Image (cartoon, helix red, strand yellow):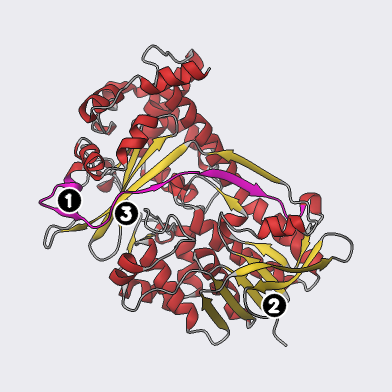
Amino acid sequence: MAERVAVLGAGMAGLCVALALAPTGREITLYERDPPPPEGGAEAAFEGWARRGVGHLRHSHAFLARLRNLIRAEHPGLLEDLRAAGARELTFAEGLPGPLRDRYVAEPGDEELAVIVSRRTTMELVIRRYVERRNNVTLRSGMFVQGLVTEPGAGGGVAVRGLNLAGESDALAEIVIDAGGRASPAVEWLRDAGATIPEEEEDCAILYYTRFYRHEPGAGEPPRGRFGVTGDLGYLKFAVFPADNATFSITVAVPQVEEALRAAVVRPEVFDRICARLPGIAPWTDPARASPISRVHGMGDLKSRWREMAPEGTPVTLNWFAVGDSLARTNPLFGRGCSFAAAEAHLLRDALSQTTDPAERARLYSHRVRAALRPYYDDMRAQDRSAARRALHGLDPGYRRPWRARLKRRLLEDGITIALRRDPVLLRAAMRAFHMLEPPQAWLTRPATLAKVLATWARGRRANAPYYAEKSGPGRTEMFADLGLPAGADLARLRAAG
């Protein structure tokens, strides 16, 4: 008899579980509290799909090569469905900065570096309809899970036997999966049942603001600058995200300490004014080329979080597995959330297939998730800390970095960044790390990479002048003056608070 799998949540994490486990023949039921998507296609989903459980549904998303390659390898029909719905694949060659395009020579493996560009609503809608066509997958919307069915586990820990449903009999299952996202109550239910679950958490110290637009008929995407349409000005980061069906989004990320800017940017007129002052963004939001199709969506309370379900090889739960944000979360800056969920779902599939012993399944899954994903978590957390320090110091016009920090900054700006813009081989290696196909810092620690970076730095700014980007935007003082914001208010408040 096939194992029964009960999945809490049918967002991207739950759908990734269905994609991974459905081919194994298990009987899978996903329980989702939000209503199903409205009838219709991509536009109906974007305009009318109510998803209280997914606060970032209408924020920019990047579906990295790690996820796209899993879909291409195991579900080619799904990839065709996504293309038919308007999603696109941007290749490594298409994303090359201007100075590298004439020097690019395709190599085996470049086809692995394609990213799917789509609105989250379109992506989720298409995957949902794909998994619903599987005979062994049932998706139940409007279902409220109010607890777990548990009992003491053999050898300690908590054994989970199913989900407690509001107004219905318990949904018993041999495998229970928490794909309920960052606000899932399942871990607290387990703790109430006696499980001790180690957890680390740290504030990302940044907030995101996103608005969607549609290209005017015949306008298409404007020419990009020499080095793309992203930027980091210290007091804000920004990026353009192409999407499906002539749509795109712009996200502005504001450090937590910039309270005046955070309060203002959510207003559409302020958001659009900021975009108009950013040379790489302004052509995209030019009213002659595009029109907004959404309000400005804010996303805050962002935390990095890592939970250990088998610390030191000792499972704290049996038959219960977390996938997605309920297990591990990072700053969404690099768009790794969906790829984390997809990777975890497939690691879980492999652990379940290798043994039927509940404790060994828990150990295998926990160990493999840590080995595969913890380096990306640690890397992002380190970047968050650095960005938070930079933003705080940016509030003080008189601040001067220590010499070590200045040297490190020069190595980044005049060495690493310029080397990536000069050398497609280096950029290819960096993008493999970005797309989670290699460890995050592996490319940078190779002797050949270090030699190229140092040689580029030694050339000096004059020789490297063609590889520096155009000015990506005004400084903080200039931008705040243009927006009518008090540039010194946040620093004064922080000093008063000590």
The part of the image, by quadrant, that contains residue 146 is bottom right
Please tell me how crowded label 1 is: few (under 14), some (14-19), or many (20+) other residues with Cα within 10 Å.
Answer: some
Residue at 39% from the left image edge and 30% from the top image edge:
258
| Secondary element at image label 2 | loop
Number of other residues with Cα within 10 Å of mark 2, as a class: few under 14, some 14 to 19, many 20 or more: some
The Cα atoms of the two marked residues, 1 and 3, are separated by 18 Å
Residue 59 image position (x, y, % from top left): 37, 54
Disc 2/disc 3 C-alpha distance (Å): 52 Å
Q: In the image, what residue type sits under mark 2?
A: Asp
The image shows residue 386 at horizontal and vertical percentages of 50, 30
- Please tell me which of labels 2 and 3 falls first in the chain: 3
**Residue for badge 1:** 222
Is 384 covered by the magenta stretch?
A: no
- The residue singled out by tag 2 in the image is 170
**Mark 3 — residue?**
93
Task: Select label 2 or label 1 by which is in front.
Answer: 2
Q: Secondary structure at mark 3?
A: loop
